[in-house]
Image (cartoon, rainbow, N blue to C red):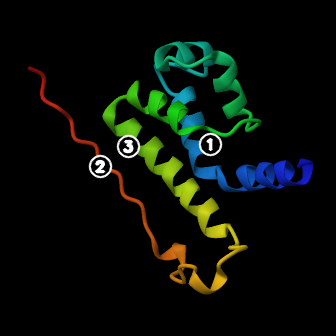
Amino acid sequence: MFLLTFVNYMLHIHYVNKFHKEFKRVLNDPPFNGTQLALAQHAGVEPAQLNRVLKKTNAATPEFVGRLCGSLPPEQSALLLKAYLDDVLAATAAAKPTTYKAASWRRPLSDIEVSVKCRVKKAG
């Protein structure tokens, strides 16, 4: 159990580079100016959870990313979501199949590219 947890932790640390960089940029830019509490309150997440994701001791969950993206301007949301999805794809591509090798999908996942567009809804 410990070994599996350690391996998952190492994969998480290695493959969350794009999201972590974009997340830190969002935190350090105005209006948050590096204040974790302000960003946590704005996004509706627990400050401790935001801190653990920032320190890479916990992985960003889809719910966490959704709350964060839902609270940011559309352009920032699109950049953050794309970074998250790129990291998920990189971690998935790095996973080695352990069962059903003969029937596994053979196309390399590195051929896949993620694109995120944000449509701005008109008020009213």
Q: Position of residue 67 (x, y in %)?
A: 46, 27
Q: Which residue is mark 2?
A: 117
Residue closest to the far bottom: 102
- Secondary structure under tag 3 reads helix
Q: Is residue 87 left or right of residue 13?
A: left
Q: Is tag 2's residue or tag 1's residue first in the polypeptide sequence?
A: 1
Q: Quadrant of residue 33?
A: top right
In the picture, measured across the screen, residue 33 lies left or right of residue 123, that is right
Residue 97 percent location from the top left of the image: 68, 73
Around disc 3, counting alpha carbons within 10 Å, would you say few (fewer than 14), some (14 to 19), or many (20 or more)?
some
**Which of the image's four quarters has the C terminus?**
top left
Q: Which mark is residue 20?
A: 1
- Mark 2 surroundings within 10 Å by alpha-carbon count, few (fewer than 14), some (14 through 19), many (20 or more): few
- In the rendered structure, find residue 78 and report the number of the disc placed on it: 3
Q: Position of residue 62 (x, y in %)?
A: 52, 39
Looking at the picture, which amino acid does disc 1 mark?
His
Gap between marks 1 and 3, in whole Å? Answer: 15 Å
> Which residue type does callout 2 highlight?
Lys
Q: Crowding at label 1, few (<14), some or many (≥20) Cα neighbours within 10 Å?
A: many
User: x, y (%) of residue 68?
Assistant: 48, 29
| Marks 3 and 2, the one that precedes in the sequence | 3
Q: Are the residues tagged 2 and 1 within 8 Å (C-beta)?
A: no
